[in-house]
């Protein structure tokens, strides 16, 4: 697969996960180019538009663990919106 960097209209790269607000907003300098930064670093902060002490919604992955009956439903990668339905199924609390 060809890994070409896709660029925005300002000629700079961008990450697919973005925030409208958060501590990484810049208000007095041009937007930094993520291609010139190690975006896999543990201390990397996603770019944001509005400066706040913290962001209001994260895009991180979280771990879901289960044991007991129906625990097999919780395996692999699960989309966030599916977790409610899987828990409901595991509890046999159907509509």
Image (spheres, rainbow, N blue to C red):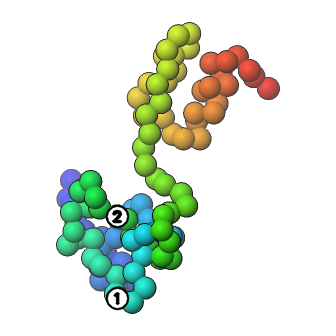
Q: Earlier in the sequence, mark 2 or mark 1?
A: 1
What label sits on residue 45 in the rendered view? 2
Q: Helix or strand or loop: what does disc 2 sit on?
A: loop
Q: Is residue 13 positioned above or below 58 on the image?
A: below
Q: Which of 82 and 57 is in front in this view?
A: 57
> Quadrant of the rendered structure where residue 45 is?
bottom left
Q: In this view, does 38 lie to the left or right of 64?
A: left
Q: Is residue 42 positioned above or below 75 on the image?
A: below
Q: Helix or strand or loop: what does disc 1 sit on?
A: loop
| Other residues around mark 1 within 10 Å, as few (<14) / some (14–19) / many (≥20) | few
> Quadrant of the rendered structure where residue 6 is?
bottom left
Residue extending furthest front?
A: 53
Q: Is residue 66 positioned above or below 84 on the image?
A: above
Q: Residue at x 64, y 30 (%)?
A: 85
Residue extending furthest bottom?
A: 28
Q: How far apart are marks 2 and 1 (CA)?
A: 16 Å
The x and y percentages for residue 67 are: 49, 14
The x and y percentages for residue 10 are: 34, 85
The x and y percentages for residue 7 are: 31, 75
What label sits on residue 29 in the rendered view? 1
Q: In this view, does 40 lie to the left or right of 91?
A: left
Exactly how many numbered labels are in the figure? 2
Q: Quadrant of the C terminus?
A: top right
Residue extending furthest top?
A: 69
Q: Residue at x 54, y 41 (%)?
A: 80
């Amino acid at each position: 697969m060809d890994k070409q960097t896709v660029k925005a209209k300002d000629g700079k790269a961008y990450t697919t996960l973005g925030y409208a607000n958060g501590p990484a907003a810049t208000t007095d300098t041009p937007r930094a180019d993520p291609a010139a930064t190690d975006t896999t670093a543990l201390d990397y902060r996603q770019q944001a538009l509005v400066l706040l002490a913290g962001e209001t919604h994260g895009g991180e992955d979280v771990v879901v663990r289960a044991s007991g009956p129906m625990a097999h439903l919780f395996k692999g990668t699960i989309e966030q919106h599916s977790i409610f339905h899987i828990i409901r199924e595991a509890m046999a609390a159907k509509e």
